[in-house]
Image (cartoon, rainbow, N blue to C red):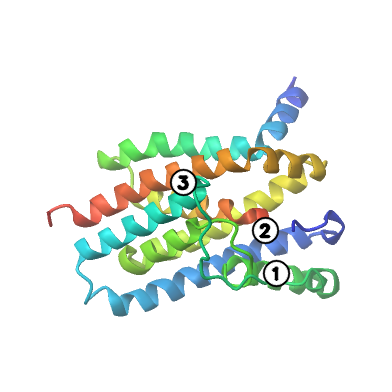
Amino acid sequence: MSAHVAAASRRLLTRPMATAFGTTAIAFAVVPAIAAGHLPMALSWVVLAFSAGYAISGSV
Amino acid sequence: MLLSSSVWRGNARWWFAGGLLLGGLTAGFVAVMLGSLARPVVPEVVGAVLVAAVLAVIAGQELGLYQLPLPQNARQVPQSIVAEGGRVGGLQFGFEMGTGVRTFMTSGLPHVLLVAVFLFASWPHALLAGVSFGAGRAWMALSRLWRRDTEAWDDDLARRDRLIRVVLTAVSAAVLGLILWDALSGRL
């Protein structure tokens, strides 16, 4: 069972679209929370910079 | 342009990833240091308009409306650095790439980030953004290698390139709006 979970996780984590939508999901989760003052502003910088780094890395 | 898997023997990929983080950290340091000279003389409202304008222009490119000749070095770090340099080679390769200076810019989002850090980031936020930029670069490289079938990964990326760009641009716009709103709150 755990091998199936590990394999499924691996498949998910190695899909470019999964990363893009994962980043989106995180943004949707953190933006309202940060706006409400529940999470540090630093997370916005993390999401912004991670997105920029991921976006140009087709050139790696 | 993606690196051939044969380059990544042993722990080279981890040294490379470490180099990416260090390179991003360095870029963040330089950006906030230079920005500290500009921030006292650029009103925050003007800075916010500038950042929003840069994002709007870049978004048009990411959506495929036009292609901009954005400033970039447009040179790839030679792969031989990794193959011949061992650990230090991987670290150096990652560092140079992580700064975003010696690479091809296939997206304009790093330019948006640079302007935002330059005009609005505090020192801790700038350094955090730098490391996160390196982490974004590292994640793509590492997740591709973890896929094992790197050709399938390349096909996957090429097939969904436009959608990924649109998604990442939307995410960037959302969090950047938050950053600008936070910077301007109480000043409007």
Quadrant location, the N terminus of chain B: bottom right
Q: What kind of residue is marked 3?
A: Thr
Which residue lies under the disc numbered 1?
B76
The spot of residue B42 in percent (x, y) is: 23, 72
**Of label 3 and label 1, which has the lower sequence position?**
1
Rendered image quadrant of residue A56: bottom right
Q: What kind of residue is marked 1?
A: Gln
As measured in the structure, the alpha-carbon distance from the residue carrying label 1 to the one carrying label 2 is: 8 Å
The spot of residue A24 in percent (x, y) is: 48, 37
Q: Do the residues marked 3 and 1 share a common chain?
A: yes
| Observer able to see residue B101 | yes
Q: What kind of residue is marked 2?
A: Ser
Q: Are marks 1 and 2 in contact (CB under 8 Å)?
A: yes
Rendered image quadrant of residue B184: bottom left
Q: Chain of mark 1?
A: B
Assign a secondary structure to mark 3.
helix
Q: Do the residues marked 1 and 2 share a common chain?
A: no
Q: Please give left or right for residue B105 compared with residue B56 in the image.
A: right
- Residue at x 81% of width, y 75% of height: B85
As measured in the structure, the alpha-carbon distance from the residue carrying label 3 to the one carrying label 1 is: 24 Å
Q: Chain of mark 3?
A: B
The spot of residue B51 in percent (x, y) is: 33, 60
Position of B80 relative to A9 (above/below): below
Q: Are marks 3 and 1 in contact (CB under 8 Å)?
A: no
Label 2, residues with CA under 10 Å away: few <14, some 14-19, many ≥20: some
Which residue lies under the disc numbered 2?
A59
Quadrant location, the C terminus of chain B: bottom left
Label 1, residues with CA under 10 Å away: few <14, some 14-19, many ≥20: some
As measured in the structure, the alpha-carbon distance from the residue carrying label 2 to the one carrying label 3 is: 18 Å
Which residue lies under the disc numbered 3?
B169
Rendered image quadrant of residue B89: bottom right
